[in-house]
C-alpha cells in the first residue's frame, strides 16, 4: 500500500513536469482619461420662456487658416469638431424669420466668403457629415458673416443680445462670426397667463404684468391701471414710481406722467447716493420730454 501511494505521487510529479508552462497573467494597466483635442461643451440659455441648449465640440485655431483653409469654402461643415452640433428648442421659435417647431436638430453650415448657408437638419444625433442627408433638412437660411477685430482661438457658439423673447446666436471662429436671430413668441405665451393670474384670487403680480405690457407695446392703459396698484403697495420705491411715469406717458396721460415723475424726483432726493442721482437724472430727462 505504501509503495503504491509513493508510485502515484512520483507519476503525478513526472506528468506535471511534462505539461506546458503557462505564462503569468499580465497586470491590468490603469484606465487613463486623455484631454480632448476639441473638447465638447453644452450651452444652455433661456430666451423669454424658451430653453435653448446647444452641444458642440470646440476645435482650436493653432495658427492655422480656418475658413477657406482648414474648413473649405462651399463644403458642408459639421460646425465644430467630432459629432455634428446639436441644438434643442423647448418651444416653437423663429429662426431668422423661419418657423421652427420645438425639438432637437443637427446644425450644419456651408461657409463661404460672402454668405453662409446655415442648415437645421431633422436628425439631431449625427457623427458628422458622412451620414448627412439633405432630404432631412428642416430649413436652410442664408447669413452674411461678420468680420471680427480680435481672432477667436477655439470655435465658439454664443447667444447674446437677449431682450424679451429674442436673442442672437453667433458662430465664431478665427476672425469670422455668423449671427442668427432667434425669436420666441413670448407675448402669445405670457398674455393668457397674466390674464389668468389677474382673474384669480390672491396676490397679483401688478408690477411685473404692467412692465411686461409696457416693454412689449401692449395695452398701455391696462398697464397704467396695474402699475397704479403696484405703487399703492410700494409708494416710496423711487424706481417703481419712475416707471409708473413712463407707462403713463406711453398711455397718453401727460399730466399723470408729470405728477409721477415729480414724485419720483422727490423720492430720489430722499434716497441720495448713486441711486438717487441716477433717478434724479432720469426723471429730469422725462420731464423735459413731457413739456
Image (spheres, rainbow, N blue to C red):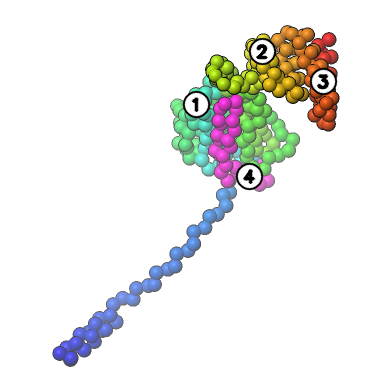
Specify whether residue 46 is painted magenta: yes
Residue 97 at what x, y percent from top left? 58, 20
Residue receiving disc 1: 102
Residue positioned 66% across, 13% down in the render: 225
Disc number lying in front (1 or 2): 2
Residue 115 at what x, y percent from top left? 63, 27
The tag earlier along the polypeptide, 4 or 1, is 4
Residue positioned 69% across, 29% down in the render: 146
Name the secondary structure under disc 1.
loop
Residue receiving disc 3: 265
Residue 111 at what x, y percent from top left? 60, 32
The tag earlier along the polypeptide, 2 or 3, is 2
Give the alpha-carbon distance from disc 2 to disc 3, as whole Å. Answer: 21 Å
Disc number lying in front (4 or 2): 2
As rendered, which of 208 and 141 lies closer to the eye? 208
Give the alpha-carbon distance from disc 3 to disc 1, as whole Å. Answer: 46 Å
Amino acid at each position: 500500500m505504501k509503495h503504491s501511494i509513493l508510485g502515484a505521487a512520483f507519476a503525478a510529479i513526472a506528468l506535471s513536469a511534462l505539461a506546458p508552462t503557462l505564462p503569468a497573467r499580465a497586470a491590468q494597466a490603469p484606465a487613463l482619461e486623455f484631454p480632448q483635442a476639441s473638447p465638447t461643451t453644452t450651452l444652455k440659455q433661456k430666451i423669454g420662456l424658451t430653453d435653448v441648449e446647444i452641444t458642440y465640440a470646440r476645435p482650436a485655431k493653432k495658427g492655422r487658416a480656418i475658413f477657406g483653409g482648414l474648413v473649405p469654402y462651399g463644403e458642408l461643415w459639421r460646425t465644430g469638431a467630432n459629432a455634428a452640433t446639436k441644438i434643442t428648442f423647448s418651444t416653437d421659435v423663429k429662426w431668422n424669420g423661419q418657423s421652427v417647431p420645438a425639438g432637437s436638430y443637427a446644425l450644419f453650415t456651408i461657409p463661404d466668403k460672402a454668405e453662409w448657408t446655415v442648415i437645421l437638419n431633422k436628425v439631431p444625433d449625427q457623427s458628422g457629415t458622412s451620414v448627412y442627408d439633405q432630404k432631412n433638412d428642416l430649413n436652410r437660411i442664408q447669413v452674411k458673416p461678420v468680420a471680427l477685430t480680435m481672432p477667436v482661438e477655439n470655435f465658439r457658439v454664443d447667444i447674446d443680445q437677449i431682450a424679451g423673447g429674442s436673442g442672437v446666436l453667433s458662430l465664431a471662429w478665427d476672425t469670422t462670426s455668423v449671427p442668427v436671430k432667434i425669436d420666441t413668441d413670448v407675448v402669445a405665451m405670457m398674455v393668457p397667463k397674466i390674464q389668468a393670474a389677474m382673474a384669480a384670487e390672491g396676490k397679483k403680480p401688478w408690477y411685473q404684468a404692467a412692465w411686461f405690457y409696457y416693454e412689449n407695446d401692449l395695452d398701455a392703459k391696462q398697464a397704467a391701471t396695474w402699475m397704479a396698484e403696484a405703487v399703492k403697495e410700494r409708494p416710496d420705491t423711487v424706481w417703481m414710481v419712475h416707471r409708473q411715469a413712463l407707462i403713463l406717458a406711453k398711455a397718453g396721460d401727460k399730466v399723470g406722467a408729470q405728477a409721477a415723475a415729480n414724485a419720483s424726483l422727490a423720492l430720489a432726493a430722499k434716497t441720495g447716493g448713486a441711486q438717487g442721482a441716477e433717478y434724479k437724472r432720469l426723471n429730469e430727462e422725462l420731464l423735459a420730454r413731457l413739456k
